[in-house]
Amino acid sequence: MQLKPINLQLGWPSTYLFPRLGLLESTRATLSDKQITADALIYGPEAGYQPLRNSIARWLTSFYRPTAGPVSSSRICISNGASGNLANILAKFTDPVYTRHIWMIEPTYFLACPIFEDAGFVGRLRGVPEDDEGINIQWLRTKLIESSKSEVERQAVKTGPRYPKLYKNVVYVVPTFSNPSAKTMSLRRRRELVQVAREFDALIIADDVYDMLRWPIKDTQASTSSLGLPPPRIVDVDRESAGTTQFGNAASNGSFSKIVAPGVRVSWVEGTKDFTEEMSKVGSTKSGGAPSHLTSVFVDQLLSSGALNDHIDKVLIPTYQRRYSRMMTAIQQHLVPLGVRVTTGKPYSMTVAAGRTPEAGGFFTYLSFPVGLPAAEDIAKRALEDYALKIAYGKMMTVTGDPESDERAEKTFGHGARLSWAWHNEDEIEEGVARLAKVLQDLRGLPQTVALGRKGPYQNTRQPLELNFD
């Protein structure tokens, strides 16, 4: 019997989770009003559709409740997706000669590497390893010191008033429910990272795209209200810390791709008022107006009406929570007995306060395979060829062009894989994990204990899981 393909590598939201009716109503409301239609179909203002900037500012204030006070719309600039945001930030605030290195969290979101290379940083991407609390600050500091001592400061290519601020270093992180490691950076590390960035003239670019998707780890019936406030974004840590500079040392890269749909291509960047003002002056925006302007108006209708919050709370979070629970149960049932470990670091709750409810979220988990098996890429190849199962193996997550990243992968994260619950339903996820167990059994020459294509005896188990967060 030919097996149905299962793709646990894919980090895309299921198409049936898109808020189709909400977007339909938003489109109708937009195009039914002559003035809104005119505003939506003309070249957009450079910083983006002002009502959406206002709506995002209120929404972020309500969600994060930053200690530095409400988020102002002057801190928001609209763009065309997190990847487009990243390219625009590099175009405006880095220089291929003056900026020394791009320091990328490792394992890294590998599709970010070409964006940095396109900006002129081929051969200058450097991996920064993680530990259980996220980015290894001491390691980063040591490397920044070495870089500052060994490299001669070079004259920037980008000069004049169009480039009032260029950073000597860039640090790229995914602080909360990281892609690919699924780790959440501790509050201590966030604060330390801001101080290091200020010390070495670095811009921290934080992909904050999974923050809204969070739920309790152990109680699948509990609501997110039991979790307390989400981890503060690094841009908020920068704002609340004494010594904030004119352009700041952090930018929050936010997107509606994970919570509305990738195809709307609407995102935002948040930074200081002067930072976002410069972002609105990127050449392509000065010429063509705000990117994704029409869909920005649709998204504003969805957000300002409360429909998006309802969609997140009533559709996305319950769905992903169920999928996460099924995946973790299947891993415990089939992979842990084979020596596989879940290695997603310490839950944020363990790093901030006793008694706080442990939380999970985002799209991914990360597994470490036991010794004695072939390389993770060979496991992935076997899974695809023999069992129609696709997984993201560890060496995909190295930092391009960094030999030290390759060496660390050989010793650590390269012996693992990222699994996603974003695309498939619970039964398919369970089946996918069972197939991965079958692959490992084949490679070890063990008896088959998994019957593929049928439900396992654990399917209806709803007991809390005790996972190994190392």
Image: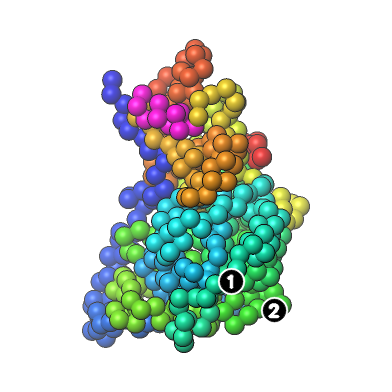
Q: What residue lies at 45% left-to-right and 76% top-to-bottom?
A: 157
Between 408 and 26, the one nearer to me in the picture: 408
Q: What residue lies at 55% left-to-right and 34% top-to-bottom?
A: 415
Mark 2 nearby-residue class (10 Å; few <14, some 14–19, many ≥20): few
* Apparent side of residue 80 relative to residue 436 in the rendered image (left or right): left
x, y percentage for residue 23?
A: 31, 65
Q: Is residue 402 magenta?
A: no
x, y percentage for residue 252?
A: 53, 68
The local secondary structure at tag 2 comes to: loop
x, y percentage for residue 380?
A: 43, 32
Residue placed under numbered mark 2 in the picture: 243
**Quadrant of residue 328 within the rendered picture:** top right
Between 334 and 102, the one nearer to me in the picture: 102
Mark 1 nearby-residue class (10 Å; few <14, some 14–19, many ≥20): few
Q: Amino acid at mark 2?
A: Gly
Q: Is residue 438 visible?
A: yes
Residue placed under numbered mark 1 in the picture: 153
Looking at the image, what colour scheme do you see?
A: rainbow
Q: Residue 318's mark? A: none
Q: Quadrant of the N terminus?
A: top left
Is residue 342 placed above or below 82 in the rendered structure?
above
Q: Amino acid at mark 1?
A: Glu
- Range covered by the magenta-colored residues: 376-386
Q: Is residue 187 visible?
A: no
* Apparent side of residue 68 relative to residue 162 in the rendered image (left or right): right
